[in-house]
Image: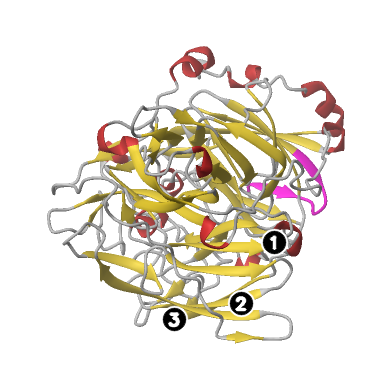
Amino acid sequence: MPDLTRRRVLAVGGALGVMAAGGLGVAAGLSRRPAATGAELRSAIPLPPPFEVPLPLPAVLEPVSKGAREDRYEIVQRETTAEILPGLRTRLWTYGGTFPGPTIESRRGRPVTVAHRNELPVPTVVHLHGGRTPAESDGYPTDLVTPAGWPTTAHGGDMGHGGHTGHGSGGAMHDPKAVTTALTREYTFPLDQRPTMLWYHDHRMDFTAPAIWRGLAGLHIVRDDAEEALGLPAGPRELPLMIADRAFAADGGLDYPSLDPTLRGRPGVREPYVAGVLGDVILVNGAPWPVHEVDAARYRLRLLNASNARHYELAFVDEGDGRMYEFVQIGADQGLLAAPVEHSTLPVAPAERYDLVFDFSRVPVGTLVKLVNRLGSGRTRDVMAFRVVRKAADDSRVPSVLSTDLPRWRRSDAVRVRDFSFRAGRMGEDDGHGWLIGGQPFDPARPDVTVRLGDVEIWRLVADVHHPVHLHLTGFRILSRGGDEPLPHDGGLKDTVSLRPGESAEIITRWEGYRGRYLFHCHNAEHEDMGMMANLQVT
């Protein structure tokens, strides 16, 4: 994974298109850009009609204690059943007994400690996605929390029958730095970062995808006084929306094509789904195609794509005449934009978050406004709906200046440029194909990239198919796509960048916060389980 010196930085400019020439067929890739990477898993039962189930709102978790300087929470990871499809019970793995898990709301700069107790049948790891977190609480994939009775080894505990199974190869992969705890682990999050909506999810090596699919995901919202003083829609007019697709078996359980459904041995999915698992049911906050009654007023919609592999191109559509309504983007993964941006559609890749304001006062009372996925077909075209039921007073606003604290990194600030390819390839001589970064599958014991705390770097990324690339610890700005300007939705501070088929992108960041071992990886969850992660050492 080569890097370039400062002297090379000024020469690269935005000319990213040339770096993708190595057999990717960039022009053809950019012209096709298929709507999906992965295969759709079809449910074995009749599906309910859309827009009949009310939108649930995840409960806000209360701290078990509030100290002078930090708050403490406790979450039990446990199996339960819940009614997701009307009239059927679905077995789930949950944080605190609900899907999504409970929402944690915290204040900027006030640390929280979350004690997670694992009562599931397999080890787990918790990652606060988007959190600026010390390495020991970041959720490295081999830092396992093991359930009662789980066998352990000297380093890192059991990682799938005594060792990490090598992305399906059956050969153990040892991690001498792994830190395993039995039953309970405390994660401390300083939250010294911009206010935004984060999310927490399982990050166990080789089994992230099926664990999230079974329900291990929840929201964490960071707030501060400056954001609350802006006058944005709040209270019942601020809606967190976790969008995820799933498929259901004949008995109402979640269907998923695991090679080992116990998630205790061989990782991976059956051959048709190695590019990603797509479900045919769209859930929002755990409900299928829900509907929410709204006032004729502004609403703040905080979107998360928690799907394993499905991409969305979202639009608000009038059910009656099919017209598309414009809306305003006010934030990205890592908080508010500098100024609002108006859109008519919005692409959202797995793990991306967007902060929107939609003004329902422009819509006649009685209207049903559908949130649709223009990349979907059939039932996966619908996401949810809003029914405007009453006129109401509204003192909210969207100011022309949202924030003034976005970093202003320049190309000349960068001390090096690094190139990374995200492509399918061979895992090893006997291991078949998987997903690689820089031609290599993930190995927890191999150092990949070392960065210095405080350095500014430019990373140039190139993809063969869809790859939403996520960096732990830091936020970044998107400088360019394919050598051109960023897209209209690319503004603000990000932690996940969606690379489309055959596309290159350039990002810039300063490594700030903490030293230690972190990761960057593709957030197509099947891709990361099959090798598309790399180690990142901050020194």
Q: Residue at x 43, y 48 (%)?
A: 525
Q: Along the polypeptide, which appears first: circle 3 or circle 1?
A: 3
Give the crowd class for mark 1: few <14, some 14-19, many >=20 residues within 10 Å.
some
* Amino acid identity at mark 1: Gly
Nearer to me, 181 or 484: 484
User: Which residue, given by chain and number where applicable, does mark 3 sit on?
Assistant: 183
Give the crowd class for mark 3: few <14, some 14-19, many >=20 residues within 10 Å.
many
User: Which residue, given by chain and number where applicable, does mark 1 sit on?
Assistant: 516
Q: Residue at x 55, y 72 (%)?
A: 179
The alpha-carbon separation of the residues under discs 2 and 1 comes to 19 Å
Q: What's the mark number on residue 113? A: 2
Q: Residue at x 36, y 78 (%)?
A: 119
Q: Which quadrant: the N terminus?
A: top right
The alpha-carbon separation of the residues under discs 3 and 1 comes to 24 Å
Q: Give the extent of the magenta segment.
A: 448-457
Q: Secondary structure at mark 3?
A: loop
Indicate the position of residue 57 as horizontal and vertical percent values.
Answer: 43, 62
Nearer to me, 511 or 161: 511
Indicate the position of residue 33 as horizontal and vertical percent values.
Answer: 45, 22
**Residue 505, quarter of picture:** top right
* Amino acid identity at mark 3: Leu
Q: Which quadrant: the C terminus?
A: bottom right
